[in-house]
Image (cartoon, grey):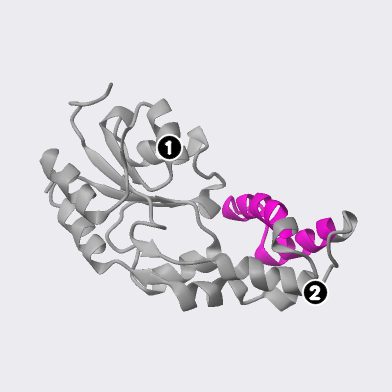
Amino acid sequence: MWRGRAIRAVIFDIGGIVVHADFGGIAKVASMLYGCTEENLLPHLQELVKQLERGEVTSVKMWEELGRLLALHRLGRATKPQRFSNLWSLSLKESMSIDEEMLAICRGLQNKVPVAALSNTIEEHADLFQQKGVYSPFNPCILSYEVGMRKPEPEIYLYTTNMLQVAPQNCLLIDDAMENIMAAREMRMQTHHFTTRENLLRELKRKNLL
């Protein structure tokens, strides 16, 4: 519907596009510490991570609440949340790879349009990405835990376009999660569902952005 509208800003998701990581080990470690199965742990963990990504709770409080819920439902046992203090950062450090070619693409786009980041993330991960220079090509850099919103909530898309001072229909969102893509389309944004770097390059060249 919005094909042909001028693109005046490009917005990148980070995880799965610029940074690749495997967080499957977190559920395995947590299930052992709580004395429960991963199947029983995951639904509670996934909901609490959403709160963590909005900055509504700290990691310590999240792990504490997870133990309380598991014990309440007799699915596992509560344990000291301090046992998880380094789990997020260690898991990321062990599995993280940064796509330097993708960062170069982002820097190249800066010659044409503003390039922003819009990422659902937590403080521990953001700190590590900052240290590694992951956020350097992006301005503004909208991180969910800092703004109290997360994709696919409509408000975070409006917040981002307002920060860019560009109308939603003139923004291109690049994201690997179809849920986020569909929400952005509802906000009248242009989108690209990321699958491979090669497909993205073709799309950016087709739109005369590279």
Q: Residue at x 49, y 67 (%)?
A: 22
Give coordinates of residue 177: x percent, y percent.
Answer: 43, 45
Q: Which mark is residue 167?
A: none
Q: Nearer the viewer, residue 51 or 98?
A: 98
Find residue 167 and report its horizontal and vertical position in percent: 30, 29
**Quadrant position of the N terminus in the picture:** top left
Majority secondary structure of magenta residues: helix
Percent from the top left, x then y, of residue 105? 19, 57
Residue 8 in percent (x, y) is at 21, 37
Q: Locate residue 139 relative to residue 198 in the image: left or right.
A: right
User: Closer to the N terminus: mark 2 or mark 1?
Assistant: 2
Assign a secondary structure to mark 2.
loop
134 w.r.t. 17: above or below:
below
Query: What residue is shown with label 2?
Result: 80
- Pointer 2 with pointer 1, Cβ within 8 A: no
* Residue at position x 64%, y 66% in the image: 27
**Position of 83 compared to 171: left or right?**
right
Q: CA distance from mark 2 to mark 1?
A: 37 Å
**Few, some or many C-alpha atoms within 10 Å of disc 2 (few <14, some 14-19, many ≥20)?**
few
Q: Residues within 10 Å of mark 1 (few under 14, many from 20)?
A: many
Left or right: 67, with 146 as reference point: right
Give the foreground label among 2 and 1.
2
What range is drawn magenta here? 41-70
For badge 2, the amino acid type reads Lys
Residue 130: in magenta span: no
Residue 157's label in the rendered image is 1
Location of residue 80 (image quadrant): bottom right
